[in-house]
Amino acid sequence: MALRNILVEGDPTLGKVSRKVTKFDARLHELLDDMVETLHDANGAGLAAPQVGVLRRVVVVDTGDGVLELVNPEILETSGEQTGLEGCLSVPGKWGLVTRPAVVRVRAQDRDGNWYEVEGEEMTARAFCHEIDHLDGHLYTEKVDRFLTEEELAELLTDEGEDA
Ligand code: CO
């Protein structure tokens, strides 16, 4: 396993659409292992493959209940609405308020290609939307209600925060 370099806003790769995964081989497993290690090292809640320069539809999410690996994820259903704090490992030092669905049901493949469904609420629902947006070349900064002010940011830094 190895840490991968996380691309930051302004890198053209982050604006591109990722391709579907068709081979569930050792190379994919290595990518997933590296992404999980990179996510945990950066204290994040989610990471998408394009953020480490790989334009494939691969996402890892860990909002505190263990790691979820999502290959070729698709949103099946959403309900409700939540407005909350969001950051991104590719947009360091910024935080914003973003409105997302409250509950999100996703269909994805595991690392061996088996389809499964998973439902997320709160942070997990937010992470599913945020990471799947990355696969289509979108950053949360495009849909932010507003960014936090310097004062709000300073206050936040005394608490615990997570990037996605
Ligand atoms: Co992000």
Image: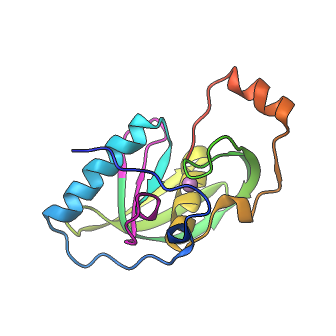
**What x and y, as percent, mark residue 51?**
47, 59
* Magenta segment boundaries in residue numbering: 50-68
State the colouring used for the structure image. Answer: rainbow
Q: Is residue 73 left or right of residue 80?
A: left
Query: Which corner quadrant of the figure contains ligand 1?
Result: bottom right
Quarter-of-image position of residue 99: bottom right
- Tell me, yes or no, whether the highlighted magenta stretch contains residue 66: yes
Residue 47 in the image: above or below residue 135:
above
Furthest-left residue in view?
26
Q: Nearer the viewer, residue 100 or 93?
A: 93
The residue most toward the front is 11
Q: How many marks?
A: 0
| Image coordinates for residue 20, horizontal then vertical, percent | 36, 78
Q: Where 49 sits versus 45, above or below?
A: below
- Note whether residue 148 is visible: yes
Q: Nearer the viewer, residue 108 or 86?
A: 86
User: 97 or 41, which is in the foreground?
Assistant: 41
**Residue 38 shown left or right of residue 75 in the figure:** left
Q: Residue at x 61, y 58 (%)?
A: 9
Question: In which quadrant of the rendered image does the N terminus lie?
Answer: top left
Picture coordinates of residue 94, whole percent (x, y)? 70, 44
Picture residue at 55% right of the left edge, 71% below the top: 12
Nearer the observer, 129 or 102: 129
Residue 81 shows in this picture: no
Image point 85% across, 39% down: which residue?
149
Q: Quadrant of residue 3?
A: top left
In this rendering, would 6 be left or right of 80?
A: left
Determine if the magenta segment contains residue 85: no
Q: Residue 61 in the image: x percent, y percent? A: 44, 49
